[in-house]
Image: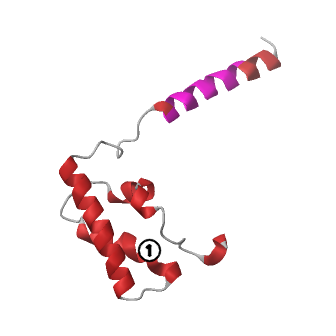
Amino acid sequence: MSRIAKTLFACVVAAGFAGVAVAAPAPGSAKLTPAEKTALKQAISSCKSEAKGKKVPWLQRRKYVKGCVVEALKDKPNIDVMTLLKTHPDMKDLPAESADAM
């Protein structure tokens, strides 16, 4: 085989492996039960209001809420809190963690 054919074959095989890895579901993305969804939503809303009540500065609020939710859901080990916080729609409207985004 020529070098070009070998390189092309290696690229196709690598792309195939990458496609399989991307298509496979993440282990932490399991579906939540309705009770777990409710617990997560309540924890997020209570932590947001607690941050406002404590007058946490605007740019530090997201970090505060994340830590608060982790503490609130500590007794539920089957919930992958960090993954859910990154993808949960209620966490999208919080300010960024640093001012670099401005």
Which residue is found at the position 53% from the left and 79% from the top? 59
88 part of magenta stretch: no
Q: Would residue 96 be found to the left or right of residue 85 on screen?
A: right
Q: Would residue 90 be found to the left or right of residue 9 on screen?
A: left
Which residue is found at the position 48% from the left and 65% from the top? 93
Please provide the residue range marked out in magenta.
Answer: 9-22
Q: Secondary structure at mark 1?
A: helix
Q: Image height check: is 19 above or below 102? A: above
Which residue is found at the position 58% from the left and 75% from the top? 98
Q: Image height check: is 49 above or below 88? A: below
Q: Position of residue 70 (x, y in %)?
A: 31, 67
Query: In this view of the protein, can residue 66 be seen by the observer?
Result: yes
Residue annotated with mark 1: 63
Query: In this view of the protein, can residue 78 be seen by the observer?
Result: no
Nearest to the observer: residue 75 or residue 31: 31
Task: Give the residue type that dot 1 points to.
Answer: Lys
Q: Image height check: is 91 above or below 47? A: above
17 part of magenta stretch: yes
Residue 76 picture quarter: bottom left
Nearest to the observer: residue 90 or residue 73: 90
Quadrant where the C terminus sits is bottom right
Q: Position of residue 54 (x, y in %)?
A: 36, 88
Quadrant where the N terminus sits is top right
Nearest to the observer: residue 100 or residue 3: 100
Q: Would residue 57 be found to the left or right of residue 76 on screen?
A: right
Q: Would residue 2 be found to the left or right of residue 93 on screen?
A: right
Residue 5 picture quarter: top right
Q: Main secondary structure of the magenta part?
A: helix
Q: Position of residue 13 (x, y in %)?
A: 62, 22
Q: Position of residue 56 (x, y in %)?
A: 43, 86
Give the residue at the far bottom of this rendering: 55
